Amino acid sequence: MEINFNDHQTEPSSQNDDSNFTIYRYKFTDDFTNELYKFSKIHQYDHRKDFKEAWNNWTDENSDLVDNEVRRLQNMDYNGDVLDKMFKSARYYFRKKSTVKKEPQQRRNYIGVQKDLLDAMDEHIISNINYKEYKPSEGFSLFCREKIELLQEEVNRLCNSGFTDHVEIKTKIKKTYKNRYFMLVTK
């Protein structure tokens, strides 16, 4: 099987600047989530206006629970409209959430790449990482041009191990290269 590693596509840059990497995900408490889920399932098939009316009644009947959750999120510096967040969760998420547990997909056994290839990738990355214009995607293309024999050996070994799709093999090797890059960068 022959794989062309040189048909490199440019990927969007996704640099992680630690100062801009803060993510806030305000979750409801488990107790509130359970009550919201029950409400959503009871009114799962209601029309929009009926759902809204039931929502208003529910928030009135459960005002203590709702008020406590609103206060909790506001104390955590949530800046949005908490009631709107609750309504949207009930109407668009919990209402459609399935109660049937999905069977996990059967995964095939993991087949790693050989240490020789990993060492060659590490050596290539270390020797090129200090160049200002170096990017992992372009580094991978350069690596493939320089280490064609090593890659052919690895492709043959992966084919003998059960891989049949050339795109899957290329993706695996490319992902391995990029993972090695990020492991070396974050050391």
Image (cartoon, rainbow, N blue to C red):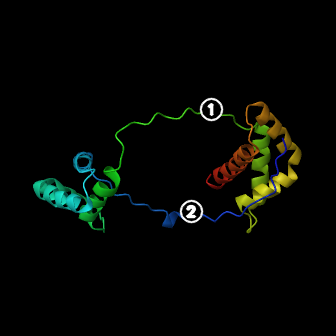
Q: As displayed, is residue 84 above or below residue 148?
A: below
Amino acid of disc 2: Asn
Q: Residues within 10 Å of mark 1 (few under 14, many from 20)?
A: few
Amino acid of disc 1: Arg
Q: As displayed, is residue 159 above or below residue 73?
A: above
Locate residue 104 relative to residue 87 in the image: left or right.
right
What x and y, as percent, mark residue 156? 82, 36
The residue positioned 15% from the left and 55% from the top of the image is 58
Nearer-the-camera pick, 7 or 138: 7
As drawn, the label of residue 16 is 2
Nearer-the-camera pick, 107 or 49: 49
What x and y, as percent, mark residue 110? 65, 34
Q: As displayed, is residue 77 above or below residue 161?
A: below
Q: Distance between the residues labelled 2 and 1?
A: 32 Å
Residue 114 shows in the view: yes
Q: Which of marks 2 and 1 is nearer the N terminus?
A: 2
Locate residue 42 relative to residue 22 in the image: left or right.
left
Of badges 2 and 1, nearer the viewer stands: 1
Locate residue 45 relative to residue 114 in the image: left or right.
left
What x and y, as percent, mark residue 162? 73, 32
What x and y, as percent, mark residue 6? 82, 56
The residue positioned 77% from the left and 48% from the top of the image is 121
Q: As displayed, is residue 116 above or below residue 17?
A: above
Residue 67 shows in the view: no
As drawn, the label of residue 108 is 1
Name the quadrant containing residue 150: top right
Q: How crowded is mark 2: few (under 14 residues within 10 Å), some or many (20 or more)?
A: few
Name the quadrant containing residue 52: bottom left
- Tell me the element at label 2: loop
- Tell me the element at label 1: loop
